[in-house]
Image: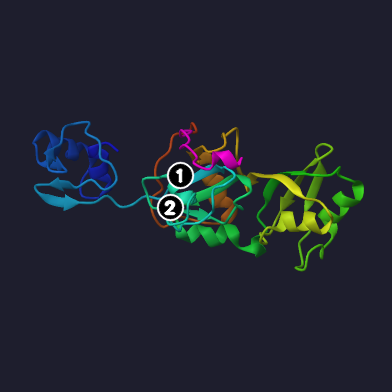
Amino acid sequence: MRINKFISESGITSRREADKWITDKRVTINGITAELGSQVAPGDDVRVDNKPIKAEEQLVYIALNKPVGITSTTERHIKGNIIDFVNHPLRIFHVGRLDKESEGLILLTNDGDIVNRILRAENKHEKEYIVTVDKPITADFLKRMADDQYIIEEKTLPRKVTKISKYVFRIILTQGLNRQIRRMCAALGYNVRRLQRIRIMNIHLDGLEIGQWRDLTPDELNQLFKDLNYKPKKKVMAQNDKKTVKKPIKNPLKKHR
């Protein structure tokens, strides 16, 4: 972030006044006199007249195309944890889970208030998956996957299920039981060969490559907040209308794919 923007977002002055302070050499970054256009990174010590200032942490919302082998956990001691994989400069956490053997869309944020709004079962928010199984898909399989409430030991809500090809189907869930799709398939004698989540509510993968992540766009956030009837308590980090796709971090577990 540019130094003048950092200072203005701390709430102590305007960006124009911050430029004057920088020109007057009143601002330092890690003990070095700042210049117009200097950049501030997370954790930098920024001072005005030798008094430290700190910008209020802004909210971020990102979409990751999680690879197989990465674990949805914030426990940093676990090898292949999702936090180290993303390596975001801010302290973020995942919204819900995606099995280690599964891949696809998962949201991460530093906004703790929005998590329950998304995950609350009674809200019946849609999550969409593409699933590949080990045997030809039959009409009976599709019907039971869609309608059978007690296909597993827990009661399940109806699903939307459509056949894509001989071994591939699409399923839309409105609840998040543990390993629900794999357990339902297993109950009908099928093994899941590949499970990919492609959508959470209005958020889609949109060509995001495996291992890459991007910030949600303003349009996506506006629709998400509207659907959740939610208003963030802090400022949301500004994003461009154009989606910015980050370069994927090398996946140490790629050999498992």
Q: Are marks 2 and 1 in contact (CB under 8 Å)?
A: yes
Q: How many marks?
A: 2
Residue picked out by circle 1? 86
Q: Residues within 10 Å of mark 1 (few under 14, many from 20)?
A: many
Q: Is residue 250 placed above or below 155 in the rendered structure?
A: above
Asked if 48 appears above or below 174 in the picture, the reply is above
Looking at this view, is 109 or 229 the one in front? 109
Distance from label 2 to label 1 (Cα)? Answer: 10 Å
First in sequence: mark 2 vs mark 1: 1
Identify the main secondary structure in magenta.
Answer: loop
Which stretch appears magenta? 244-257
Q: Amino acid at mark 1?
A: Val
**Looking at the picture, which amino acid does disc 2 mark?**
Ile
Q: Quadrant of the N terminus?
A: top left
Which residue appears at 22% of the width and 42% of the height?
Answer: 14
Q: Which mark is residue 92?
A: 2
Q: Is residue 119 above or below residue 167?
A: below
Q: Is residue 65 left or right of residue 168?
A: left
Q: Secondary structure at mark 2?
A: loop
